[in-house]
Structures are given as C-alpha cells and as structure tokens.
Image (cartoon, helix red, strand yellow):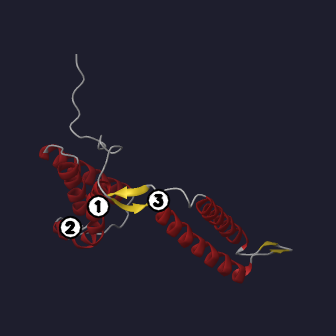
Amino acid sequence: MTAPQAEAVPADPGDDADTSPALAGERPVETVTLAVVLAVAMLLMWDNWRAGARWESTGPQAGYFPFYVAAIMAGSCVWGLAKLLRRWHRPDQPFVRRAQFKRVMQVFLPTLFYVPVTQWLGIYVASFALIAGFMYFIGKIRAWKAVLTGYLFSAAMWVIFEVAFDVIMPKGPLERAFGY
C-alpha cells in the first residue's frame, strides 16, 4: 500500500536556491531591531526607576524586577550591536528576498484585514473566511475541504466560547440573526 500524496506543499522547495533580488540585508534589519529594542528597554528602565526600583525594608519596590528585566534586555542589545560592529567589514547577507517577501505578505495582509472584518462580521464568520481562504488560495486545498475545515473550526470555537465558557466574543449579523 502506498502513502497518499499530500495536497499542500508546506514550504517552497526552492527557498535555498532563491535568486530573486534581496529587499533587505541582514545587517540593517538587525541594527534597526536591536536599536528599537534597546530604546524600549531604556524607556522601561527609566520608568521603573521612577516608579521605584530599589529594595526597601518591606521588600522590593514596584519597579524592582521590571527594571532589572529591562536592564538585561538593554545589555543583550548592546552585546548584539557590539557583535554587529565587529563583523561590519564582512559582506552583508540578504535578510529577505522578493519571492520570500511575497509569501509573507500572502499571509500577513489577509490576517491584517481579518482584524477589522472581525468587528463587522463577527469572529466566527471572519475566522471561517480566513481559514477557508488560506486553505484554498495559499494551501491549494480543494474547496470543499477548505469550506468544511473552516466551518468545523468556527463551530468548535462557537461551542467552546459561547456554550462551554460563556465568553463574550464579537458578533456579526449572522449571529444576531440566530439570536446571539
């Protein structure tokens, strides 16, 4: 007996051989990321010092532990920036190529669109559309399987949140039509 063929390809087999133009190099992306996290860590350190980051006779003040966590973050960023400076003379490697960025955007943009649509259609209908759309358009899964999976997932979410735990979730016109 032979194993059934998979319908969807989980990753592009040509990722390592991708020759599309680089959109960003590793060095600028790492530098900007480390600088932003360092700035956030410094802000957190300042705010927690202001709130009280010392040890009193009754124990630590409110900002004691967050201050030191932020200090560890800042130290890690400084370490990362120092490592970047030491290897600045080496040629930069691509961080993301055009074909890779396109695949990231295929997931990011519908997910970004999902957030406001959830407020309009409700979480269950929006989740159904997101899951079925991903499966059909990106995963190349047959339409009936995508629709069935999206429906089963949304139905399971409804049972878990609305019936079992009685959690208030964003509702849309379909749920209101059924009295929810």
Give the label, 2 or 3, closer to the camera. 3
* Residue highlighted by disc 1: 105
Q: What residue is at 32 percent from the left and 54 percent from the top? A: 100
Is residue 100 shown above or below 44?
above
Alpha carbon of mark 2 to alpha carbon of mark 3: how far? 53 Å
Residue 45 position by quadrant: bottom right
Q: What residue is at 18 percent from the left and 45 percent from the top? A: 140
* Residue highlighted by disc 2: 179
Q: Is 123 displayed left or right of 167 in the figure?
A: left
- Where residue 104 sits in the image (x, y, percent)? 32, 57
Q: Amino acid at mark 3?
A: Glu
Q: Which mark is residue 26?
A: 3
Q: Secondary structure at mark 1?
A: helix
Front residue of this view, candidates 165 and 10: 10
Q: What residue is at 18 percent from the left and 70 percent from the top? A: 173
Q: Amino acid at mark 2?
A: Gly
Give the label, 1 or 2, closer to the camera. 1
Q: Going by the picture, which residue comes out furthest to the right?
A: 57
* Residue 55 visible in the displayed image: yes
Q: Secondary structure at mark 2?
A: loop
Which of the two discs, 2 and 3, labels the residue nearer the N terminus? 3
